[in-house]
Amino acid sequence: MRNSGFFRVLAAIVVAILLVGIGVGIYQAGVTAGAAGTAAGTGATAAVPYAYGFHGWGFGFGFFGILWFLFVIFLLAGLVRFAFGFGRRGG
């Protein structure tokens, strides 16, 4: 099984392509539903104003948004370690 690394990378690529395909399909379904709802609207709708200005940082989690960012970085590093077979060391 010396080629198991190749198959892991191949499996990771296939899973990534599947997830992207599912995401695109869900996005297109939402766009289609929104377009159908707008086309069948009951009349004129008012535009919602967008509030410009400072909204904080960290994707809406205030100060703890930086922890979310670090969590994602560690999660990605763990997935890369798993994909290439660099698991836990020692006993």
Image (tube, rainbow, N blue to C red):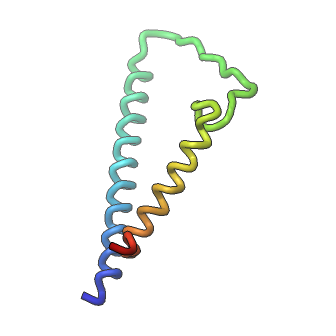
Residue 28 placement, left or right of 58: left
Instruction: Compare residues 59 and 82 and report the one nearer the observer.
Output: 82
View extreme (bottom): residue: 2
- Eyeballing the image, is 66 above or below 81? above
x 31%, y 70%: residue: 11
x 32%, y 74%: residue: 8
State the image coordinates of residue 71 (x, y, percent, origin top left): 51, 49
Query: Dividing the image into 4 quarters, which one contains the N terminus?
Result: bottom left
Residue 84 lies in what quarter of the image?
bottom left
Residue 20 lies in what quarter of the image?
bottom left
Instruction: Compare residues 32 and 18 and report the one nearer the observer.
Output: 18
x 51%, y 51%: residue: 72
State the image coordinates of residue 59 (x, y, percent, origin top left): 59, 36
x 66%, y 22%: residue: 50
View extreme (left): residue: 1
Query: Dividing the image into 4 quarters, which one contains the C terminus?
Result: bottom left
State the image coordinates of residue 85 (x, y, percent, origin top left): 36, 75
Instruction: Compare residues 6 and 31 and report the one nearer the observer.
Output: 6
Instruction: Compare residues 27 and 83 and report the one nearer the observer.
Output: 83
Residue 54 placement, left or right of 36: right
Count every numbered label the image shows and give the total.
Answer: 0
- Eyeballing the image, is 32 above or below 68? above
Residue 67 lies in what quarter of the image?
top right
- Eyeballing the image, is 52 above or below 24? above
